[in-house]
Image: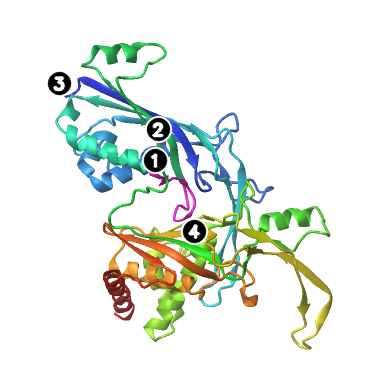
């Protein structure tokens, strides 16, 4: 048997499901629709995920664990001149995933001033995305040859971890650190055709492609997420302390365009299925602003620019910074958040208010307005789970994430709009913290394990030392 001899085929098929909105854009939009990025569509107008996007993301995951085995499966990488020290063809192929049931949404973003927390003028943009819940057929093929036989054990270990990644979830597309692009396989069927086995050869050659003797079926389980060992990850359940509103600007714009005089001034943001959500962009913006506040307080200088620069080391540059310094090298954010769906334990309620004249303290005539925030039905019950953390975190970065969790837990950090009248604060119920193979649990009203408290205090101390260095 030579290194080029064909020894086996692995066919993996399943149903790819979007757990969060997906942003794979086709470039800038037309001037008349005022959307900056449009969803990538095929010739029939159906949104799809290119196989190249899948290959790139999963290759990076595999090579982070084992670069040599990753090259055996995904081929040898090339340098900027299209050359490599030795060439090895990729053994894996991914098909495009057509999302025939996809619903598109329009999201908007702004850049906030770190000192005031107010949106910076002219730094607003809109983009089209595929909403969560869409799904499509996934197919992957791996061709094994004689060269792979020498590394069979390593390849099997990598493929087993890759399978866990597909079933537990991974991220695709743009803005993945801001709650976009999380997907997983709902079901996975794997056939391994061993060409030294005559039955598998016959099964492979049949027009209908019968199952191989080695046929396995798996169910997806997003509760069993696969993380890199060095990722610092927080999953926390919260109750809404009072009320919450994250304004749906897209709906407000539609109401204004239709001249609907009975429309509510502000309503809570929903996805295309009607579920209330906290967008990852909103959550990350809040946490970035809070992180800058923490850095300023601990540094004893109150320097806004220095605090912003420090936070950019872990959260990447803000849009405002990139606009001010377009030629500087960009650093990708290591701080990741997920979009959060809010459970059915909440309800909407209209609340009418008058605008007040700041000079007289009296109400302004004809300035009555109504907003529609959400309120928790049963106080103290968890209704929202927040997921955030730092990829390949250093101890000081873990300390910053813990301080952000503490401020959310104690209601010191508000999310969404109308914070000045008490909206947006949360009440911590339980949290799980994972780092370097260890997992610690925090529950409301219960003392934290002594060993866990010591570890977490070390992380916070490392953060304070880094700020004051």
Residue on which the image places disc 1: 167
Q: Quadrant of residue 103?
A: top right
Looking at the picture, the colour scheme in use is rainbow
Mark 3 vs mark 2: give the one in front: 2
Q: Are marks 4 and 2 in contact (CB under 8 Å)?
A: no
Q: Earlier in the sequence, mark 4 or mark 2?
A: 2
The reply to whether residue 446 is in sight is: yes
Which of pointers 4 and 3 indicates the residue nearer the eye?
4
* Residue assigned mark 4: 385
Query: In the visual, does 174 lie left or right of 442?
Result: right
Q: Quadrant of the C terminus?
A: bottom left
Q: In terms of secondary structure, where does tag 1 sit? A: helix
Indicate the secondary structure of the residue bearing disc 4.
strand
Counting from the top left corner in percent of width and height, residue 422 is at 62, 75
Give the crowd class for mark 3: few <14, some 14-19, many >=20 residues within 10 Å: few
Relative depth, front residue between 219 and 63: 219
Work out how far the residue at label 4 is from the one at label 3, CA to CA, in angstroms. 53 Å
Could you tell me which residue is drawn at 77 percent across and 87 percent down?
Answer: 361
The image's mark for residue 188 is: 2
Specify the quadrant of the image occupied by residue 394: bottom left
Marks 2,1: beta carbons within 8 A: yes
Image vertical order of residue 206 relative to residue 155, above or below: above
Check whether the beta carbons of the residues at disc 3 and disc 2 lie within 8 A of each other.
no
The residue beneath circle 3 is 2
Q: Is residue 84 something that shows in the picture? A: no
Which comes sooner in the sequence, label 4 or label 3? 3
The magenta region covers 166-182
């Amino acid at each position: 048997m030579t290194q080029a001899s064909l020894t086996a085929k692995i066919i993996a098929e399943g149903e790819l499901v979007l757990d969060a909105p997906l942003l794979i854009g086709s470039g800038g939009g037309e001037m008349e629709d005022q959307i900056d990025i449009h969803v990538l569509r095929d010739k029939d107008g159906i949104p799809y995920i290119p196989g190249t996007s899948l290959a790139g993301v999963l290759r990076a995951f595999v090579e982070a664990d084992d670069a040599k085995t990753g090259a055996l499966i995904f081929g040898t990488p090339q340098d900027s001149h299209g050359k490599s020290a030795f060439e090895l063809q990729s053994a894996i192929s991914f098909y495009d995933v057509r999302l025939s049931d996809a619903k598109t949404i329009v999201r908007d973003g702004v850049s906030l001033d770190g000192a005031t927390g107010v949106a910076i003028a002219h730094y607003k943009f809109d983009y089209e995305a595929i909403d969560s819940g869409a799904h499509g057929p996934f197919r992957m093929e791996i061709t094994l040859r004689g060269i792979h036989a020498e590394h069979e054990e390593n390849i099997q270990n990598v493929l087993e971890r890759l399978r866990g990644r597909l079933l537990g979830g991974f991220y695709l597309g743009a803005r993945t650190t801001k709650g976009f692009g999380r997907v997983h396989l709902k079901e996975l069927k794997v056939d391994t055709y061993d060409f030294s086995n005559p039955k598998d050869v016959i099964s492979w050659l049949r027009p209908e492609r019968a199952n191989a003797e080695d046929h396995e079926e798996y169910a997806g389980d997003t509760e069993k997420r696969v993380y890199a060992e060095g990722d610092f990850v927080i999953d926390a359940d919260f109750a809404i302390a009072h009320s919450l509103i994250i304004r749906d600007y897209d709906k407000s714009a539609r109401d204004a365009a239709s001249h609907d005089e009975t429309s509510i001034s502000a309503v809570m943001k929903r996805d295309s299925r009607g579920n209330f959500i906290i967008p990852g962009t909103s959550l990350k913006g809040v946490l970035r602003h809070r992180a800058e506040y923490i850095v300023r307080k601990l540094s004893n200088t109150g320097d806004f620019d220095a605090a912003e620069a420090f936070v950019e080391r872990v959260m990447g540059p803000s849009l405002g910074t990139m606009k001010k310094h377009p030629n500087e090298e960009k650093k990708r954010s290591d701080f990741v958040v997920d979009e959060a769906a809010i459970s059915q334990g909440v309800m909407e309620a209209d609340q009418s208010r008058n605008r007040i004249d700041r000079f007289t303290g009296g109400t302004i005539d004809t300035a009555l307005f109504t907003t529609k925030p959400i309120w928790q039905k049963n106080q103290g019950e968890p209704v929202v789970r927040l997921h955030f953390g730092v990829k390949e975190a250093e101890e000081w970065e873990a300390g910053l994430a813990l301080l952000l969790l503490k401020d959310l837990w104690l209601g010191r950090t508000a999310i969404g709009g109308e914070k000045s009248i008490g909206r947006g604060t949360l009440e911590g119920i339980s949290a799980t913290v994972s780092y370097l193979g260890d997992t610690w649990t925090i529950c409301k009203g219960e003392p934290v394990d002594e060993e866990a408290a010591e570890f977490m205090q070390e992380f916070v101390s490392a953060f304070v030392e880094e700020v004051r260095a």
